[in-house]
Every structure is written in C-alpha cells, then in structure tokens.
Image: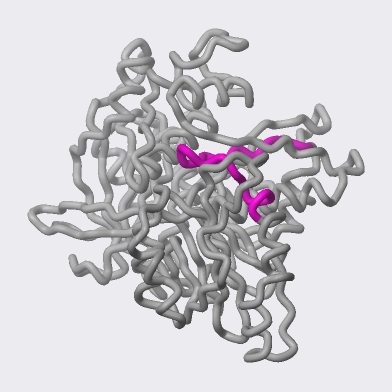
Amino acid sequence: MEFLSLNQSTLKGVILSQFPDMDRGKISEQIKEYLLPKLKIFQGAGKGTIYYSVEDEYIETEWKDMVSLHYVNTSYQLRNTVIRCHVFSCKEMEAKYYLGFFTLRPIDEIKVMISFIYPNWNNIRFNKNYDVYTMTYRKTVHIQGIEFKINTYPIFCQDSVVTSCAQASIISMSKYLRSVCGIAQLRLAEINNSYAFERKKIYPTEGLGIRQMLEIFFKNKWNITCDNIPARHEGAKENKYKQIKENIDANIESALPVFISVTYNKERTTQGRIAINHILQIIGHTTEDEKRYVILDESGVLTKEFTGARNTCIFLSWDSIVNKLFCNGGYAIYPQYEKVYMMCREIKDRLNPILVNNNDEERIRSAYQNLNFSAEDSRYLLVDNVIVKSFLKENALNLGLIKPILERNLPHYLWYCESEIGGKYLVFLADPTYNRQTTKNIFINTDAFLVSKPISLLSKYKQVSNYNVV
C-alpha cells in the first residue's frame, strides 16, 4: 500500500484522479480552506509528516443515503462508494502508528467532500501537560487483511444541502450511542420523516429547530431531557448556568454526549452582523486546574469565529462557554438512559443530609482530619450496575460493606455519587427508578463505601494540542 504525505498537493492528486476535468486553478485553494482544517485533528499526533493511504472504494451507508435522497437528482459527477483514507504517523502499517481514518465523498464539489472523521484517540498525542477524558467506542478497522482496533468517536460532516449541523450531529451521536448502550441509530430518511413541526421543502436543508429535534427524538424513542439556556445579555441568573453545568457534567461523566444549540453573531462586511444557529456536541473534558470541555464542531464555522481556523474539535472553559456560546441563549439536550427518573439535582439534595448526619462520615472524618466535603463537591454519574459491582469488588477498601451489594439485584443503571477525601473516595449509590417526589430512601448504601480510586467511563488520553484551546 502506498503512503502519501497528508498535504494539499497529494490530496489534489487524489481528487484529480477521480475527477480529471475539475477546475485545477481552484482545487488547491478549496482543499486548503475546506479539507485540511477538518483533518487538523490528526496533525498533533506526530512531530513530523503525517501520512495516509488511499482505499478507493468503501461502502458508507450515509453517503449512499445522501445520493439516493438528493444527489441522484443533480448534475454533479459522483459515485456511490466513498474514498477511505487511513492516517499514520509514519510509513509503517502498525497499530501503534495508526491515527484513524477519514472518508471523502466522491463528488466534484470539494467543499462537501469530507464525510466522516474517525480519530484513533489511542495514538493521538499533543504538546500540553494535562490529560483529556473523552467518550469513545471500540471500532474494528480492516486494511488489506490487517485488523486495527481503535477507540474513536465518529465525526460526521455536513454538506449544507442534505445535512446541516443538526442532522450531522444526530448521525454522529446516534452511531456512538448505538455502540455503547444500544440506542437506535438514526439514518437520514428516518430523521427527515420524523418531524412535522414547521416542515418545509427538505432540500436544500435549512437545518432543524429545537422543536423539530425534540420531535425526532420522541418519534425514534430516544430518552432525552432538555435545558433552556438563557441569553447572557438578559442578566440571566447564575443559578441557572450552575444547573446547566451540573447537568452537562453528569451527562459527560456518564459517557453520554450533550447537544448544545446556540445562536452566534457572524460578521458580514456590507450588512453588519447576522445571527447564525449552530449545533455542537460536548464529548469530554480536560484535567487542568480550570477544566475545559471537549467540543465537536463538525463544520468548523463556529471555531473559525473563535480561533480563525475551521477546527473540528475545540477545548473551552466553562466561562468561555457561558460568555461565547450562551451570549444569545440556546438549548442543551441530554440523551438519557431509559428508567432514569431522578436527575443530578435531586440526588444532590438527598445526599446532603446523609453526609451531614451519617455516623460513618464522622468515623471517616476522624481518619482524615480537617477535610471539608459536601454533596455540591461530589461527582455524579450514571453507571451500569455490572460495572459498579466489578469496580467496587476490585477497589473498595471496606469489603465487608460491599458484599451485600454484590449479591443484590439492582436496577440496570445506578447513580454513582463520589467525593474525594484525602486521596480516597467516598461513594454512595442511588436508585434512579424512584420518582423525584418519593418519600422512600433512594440510596442503596447509607454507610459510605471507601474506594482507592475514582471511577471513570471516559477514555483517558495524555495531553491536548494548543491550537484549539480557548
């Protein structure tokens, strides 16, 4: 298999091999503007040149859907199969050098060519001294009889005709959720046929509004909750932003992505500023003193406003999210597990009395002097009870307390409430199947479990790039 340097010149050669009649004068400029910025996620993985090999024909369901729904009726030159490009940090086809792959739509319109990007987070390394925790799923990739297993999150890129940022984000998220928890994967036809509110001519798409997205999720049996994000300039209460942050943090720690629907002002040279609606995904966070959130912007239009470049991935602090993304308001949408009826805030409110009055807490305090912790400082995440039992069996310090839990039938998902105390972790488990008005005790254990390390459902990776931090 031939290795090519990942640059403007070789991409031009690949495109011209498919479409020799394209305007050669515009190809280089369009590759630089529309293709290379989206592939920058691979560039931090090595100190030198990044390489790729080309698989000319690869079946991609999403592209076949786009062709049958729209492009078959157009005058574009195109094929049904995509071009798959495997990216390596050096010219060796080994797992330790494999950085993932991207696919190119074989159409004579460079602006819409990038289809999917699958970064292999195992091998992507950058040049800062903090870690990244991000959502991934295990994907097997076959290249000429060689099999690579990668940890990835799919990034599907819109074409602005059949798909907008909303459809693209739904497709990305549904592929991930199907792999990790069996939520139904949505295809374009299903998305298009699942809403009636404010329905207009489908192509070219005008995107999806919040009510249309909620209707799509409802009709496809996704369990979701939603927050209305108040505009920053309206003097919004800080408590509302705090609540939104709590919900985002709980979803992320539970390895469930978050949709953020925002409106931002875009400069126009002759008409002043115009408002643009955009959808982003939050899929993880960093471990700096000021935590930053891993945000996917598949089109790069919003990251270009912030950084001057069309990056598909950006890292934003909470203050930057509030001041830059929430300035005109919006919505946060949280995919959720079935049979979860209590959310993070209800769990926190019920945990506080236990932390204040529990005798076990006094015993723990005597062992760890001058420590101050509360329900507000704890981590909250929804975890499969099988994972909880396995984790406690391996890491609990008070094994006598967990034995009854290991033998007990528990709900599929549990709220895992964790507080750090002097390098150890205090844990309570809560049953989310009770409703928030219940008078019953929702906690599986009223005596605290002590464990040796924090639980995590996210994949940990060393270091992030400085090109996309705001």
Q: Residue at x 84, y 51 (%)?
A: 238
| Picture layout, residue 342 above or below residue 408 | above
Query: Which region shows up in magenta?
Result: 329-347
Inspect the magenta stretch and tell me whether residue 183 lies in it. no
Inspect the magenta stretch and tell me whether residue 335 lies in it. yes
Determine if residue 299 is in view. Answer: no
In-image side of 104 versus 216 (left or right): left
Percent position (x, y) of residue 94? 19, 68
In-front residue for pair 407/230: 407
In-front residue for pair 99/428: 428
Q: Quadrant of residue 49?
A: bottom left
Q: Residue at x 16, y 52 (%)?
A: 142
Q: Residue at x 40, y 51 (%)?
A: 153
Q: Residue at x 36, y 51 (%)?
A: 118
In-image side of 287 versus 262 (left or right): left
Please say which color scheme the image uses.
one colour
Percent position (x, y) of residue 19? 28, 32
**Quarter of the image with the C terminus in it:** bottom right
**Quarter of the image with the N terminus in it:** bottom left
| Picture layout, residue 234 above or below residue 290 | above
